Amino acid sequence: MNLTVNGEAHVVDGVATLGELLRVMNVSTKNLAVEINEKMLKPEQYETTPINDGDRIELVRFVGGG
Amino acid sequence: MIAVRLNERLLELPEGTTLAQLRAQEMPDADVAIRNGHPANDEDVLADGDCITLIQRGRTPSADELEALLVARHTPGVHEKMKTATVGVAGLGGLGSAVAIALARVGVGQLVLVDFDVVEPSNLNRQQYFIDQLGLPKVEALSQTLQRINPYVTLETKQLRLDENNAQATFAGCDVVVECFDDAEAKAMLARTLAPHLPVVAASGVAGDEPADQIRTRKVAYNLYVVGDQTSAVEPGRGLMAPRVGVAAHHQANAVLRLLLGKEPV
């Protein structure tokens, strides 16, 4: 499966949901905003959101301070 | 006849008119006169094209006068778009207090200011508050300051803690919301909650003393812009200081300005 994650091409196999993808990529869900194909997701949707070939995924990590 | 601008209003005057005559005619109570950017004398004879500012200390200009004065310094066409805009500021700390001041100065007509906190002494290292405001709710302290800058900005203040359940309703009617929180999870929450509905200008990575040029504005998702270096978290050994936080705040304010003008921030 070909994905674009933060603008970079990734080839991933054996992954059905966003939750699985985040674990495979070793991405913590802490302080994270996730968008798939320009649709922002809620954290409770991660485990049930399917990942499909060609998806464009943005992982936005926030750090503290302001 | 000569044409001069008095407080940005165009006037036609007979040749040979002195500053004293202009003052007597237009604003006899004015204490200070400025001609073409410099203090002027009563006996100065005005010339065609002069730009005169008469100031009466302690008097608040009318809404029309102040508008004319601000418009004169702005890029043409900016003011009308700012005046009708409504911008939300989520968090009034180092980022939010500076963002709100920049937006008031550029003439944004309506600001929705949200913060649950009060002004503490430790805030003064970077936040736009004053010693005599210690202990005041930040929404109240910042409103005072904004009123001193531009009394014609409409302020809506809400002293509350934003979460995924109240954020959308709190900023209903806003054209853009600026995320100015300190806490990383709160930042992510606001981006997730609001970006599906309206443009959000967030900040991430503004602490420390790394080069200011590492602060950048990026479009990271649909309706979501993030200002910062994206890595410099506040943590033991890396504090939040006025220069870098101020750079980031003004990146945010400029991104808002561009969005309101219909331009992409990046």
Image: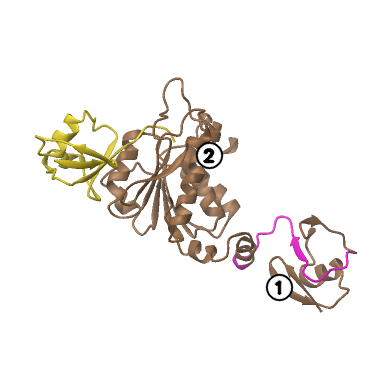
Chain colours: A yellow, B brown
The answer to whether residue B47 is magenta is: yes
- Asked if residue B18 is positioned above or below residue B99 in the image, the reply reads below
The residue at which mark 2 appears reads as B246
Chain ID at mark 1: B
Q: Amino acid at mark 1?
A: Leu
The answer to whether residue B217 is magenta is: no
Q: How many marks?
A: 2
Q: Position of residue B262 (x, y in %)?
A: 43, 61
In this orientation, does residue B31 appear? no
* Residue nearest the viewer, comparing B221 with B22: B221
Q: Are marks 2 and 1 on the same chain?
A: yes
Q: Position of residue B237 (x, y in %)?
A: 46, 20
- Asked if residue B160 is positioned above or below residue B223 in the image, the reply reads above
Instruction: Determine the secondary structure under disc 2.
Output: helix
The residue at which mark 1 appears reads as B10
Is residue B11 toward the left or the right of residue A43 in the image? right
Q: Which residue is painted at 46% across and 43% down in the image?
A: B96
The tag earlier along the polypeptide, 2 or 1, is: 1
Q: Report the magenta residues as a range.
A: B44-64
The dominant secondary structure in magenta is: loop
* Residue nearest the viewer, comparing B261 with B96: B261
Q: Amino acid at mark 2?
A: Gly
* Residue nearest the viewer, comparing B129 with A27: A27
- Asked if residue B88 is positioned above or below residue A60 in the image, the reply reads below
Q: Residue furthest right?
A: B43
Image quarter in which the N terminus of chain B is found: bottom right
In this orientation, does residue A38 appear? yes
Q: Position of residue B259 (x, y in %)?
A: 43, 56
User: How dense is the environment of label 1, judged by Cα within 10 Å: few (below 14), some, or many (20 and up)?
Assistant: few
Q: Position of residue B105 (x, y in %)?
A: 57, 54
